[in-house]
């Protein structure tokens, strides 16, 4: 992929994540988060956070985007993830666990904020000791 085409993809992902963050339902935290993902097929999916007064029932933007990819197209491999919030928060632990289930070795997570600052992470940077399907298969073998 050329530098220009990757810049266009990131710009499109940024715009999609910002736009979908406007749809966030966040009456408790006030934090509007948007996420766009690109799967290995090249398709983009988006999600926003949807809060609930029973906090455990809240679903973050990242998981909504990933679950949408799985539910609507059966997409299960992530190439790039873009997370937008006013303050540029990284994904929470629960989202990182879900991301690690579907991420490739080189999946990038780009975190952007309202001022336009972006930081690029690898999934390994954010979640170095993730529990993966490989770990689960090791447990099953030892039984």
Image (spheres, rainbow, N blue to C red):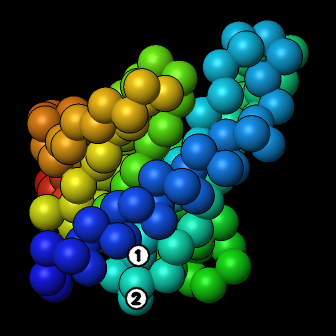
Horizontal side, residue 134 vs residue 30: left or right: left
As displayed, is residue 75 above or below residue 123? below
Decide which of 17, 46 is in the foreground and name it. 17
Q: Which residue is label 1 attached to? A: 39
Decide which of 106, 44 is in the foreground and name it. 44
Disc 2 and disc 1 in contact, CB within 8 angstroms: yes
Q: Residue at x 54, y 55 (%)?
A: 15
Q: Residue at x 42, y 25 (%)?
A: 115
Q: Which residue is label 2 attached to? A: 41
As displayed, is residue 39 above or below residue 73? above
Q: Residue at x 67, y 28 (%)?
A: 32
As displayed, is residue 56 above or below residue 30? below
> Disc 2 to disc 1, how far (Cα)?
5 Å
> Quarter-wise, where is residue 40 in the image?
bottom left
Q: Position of residue 25 (x, y in %)?
A: 82, 31
Q: Quadrant of the C terminus?
A: bottom left
Q: Quadrant of the N terminus?
A: bottom left
Q: Position of residue 85 (x, y in %)?
A: 52, 29
Horizontal side, residue 112 vs residue 6: left or right: right
Q: Which mark is residue 132?
A: none
Q: Residue at x 30, y 46 (%)?
A: 110
């Amino acid at each position: 992929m050329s530098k220009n085409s990757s810049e266009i993809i990131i710009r499109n992902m940024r715009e999609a994540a910002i736009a979908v963050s406007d749809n966030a339902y966040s009456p408790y935290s006030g934090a509007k988060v948007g996420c766009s993902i690109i799967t290995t097929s090249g398709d983009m999916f988006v999600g926003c956070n949807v809060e609930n007064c029973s906090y455990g029932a809240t679903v973050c933007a990242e998981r909504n985007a990933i679950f949408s990819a799985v539910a609507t197209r059966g997409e299960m491999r992530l190439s790039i993830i873009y997370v937008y919030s006013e303050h540029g928060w990284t994904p929470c632990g629960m989202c990182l666990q879900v991301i690690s289930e579907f991420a490739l070795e080189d999946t990038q997570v780009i975190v952007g904020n309202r001022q336009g600052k972006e930081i690029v992470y690898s999934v390994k940077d954010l979640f170095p000791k993730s529990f993966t399907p490989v770990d689960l298969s090791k447990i099953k073998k030892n039984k």
